[in-house]
Image: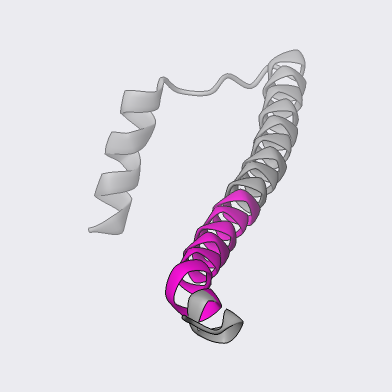
Amino acid sequence: MKTFYEEFRVYYLPWLVAASAIAIILWQQHTTIALIERINGHYLDRLATVSESLERMNVTLQTEGYTLPPLATAREAGARASR
């Protein structure tokens, strides 16, 4: 006849350890996903702010009579300037 401790150690303790490990892994995954979602939210907010600022800058330049060159032309000019 086994004692309570021997029965607990053989039958129940491995299940408790496995359940604890799975719970820790799931908790870490949940916190990681929450952190990634929060970082993406901040990134999208900043991206929207920069986009609005650039749009306002473009409108301001157009109202003052300045026009921006097409993107391909600007890239070629930037490449020539960096040489």
In the displayed structure, would residue 17 be above or below residue 2? Answer: above
Is residue 14 located in the magenta-colored stretch of the structure? yes
The quadrant the C terminus occupies is bottom left
Q: Residue at x 32, y 39 (%)?
A: 77
Judged by its main secondary structure, the magenta piece is helix
Is residue 65 located in the magenta-colored stretch of the structure? no
Q: Quadrant of residue 27?
A: bottom right
Q: Residue at x 64, y 42 (%)?
A: 37
- Nearest the viewer among 15 and 34 is 15
Span highlighted in magenta in the image: 8-32
- Nearest the viewer among 29 and 63 is 29
Q: Residue at x 58, y 47 (%)?
A: 33
Q: Residue at x 76, y 24 (%)?
A: 56
Residue 68 lies, in percent from the top left, at 53, 23
Residue 72 lies, in percent from the top left, at 31, 25
In the displayed structure, would residue 32 be above or below residue 60? Answer: below
- Nearest the viewer among 46 and 68 is 46
Q: In screen coordinates, is 10 left or right of 73?
A: right
Q: In screen coordinates, is 11 left or right of 31?
A: left
Residue at the outermost front position:
1
- Nearest the viewer among 50 and 36 is 36
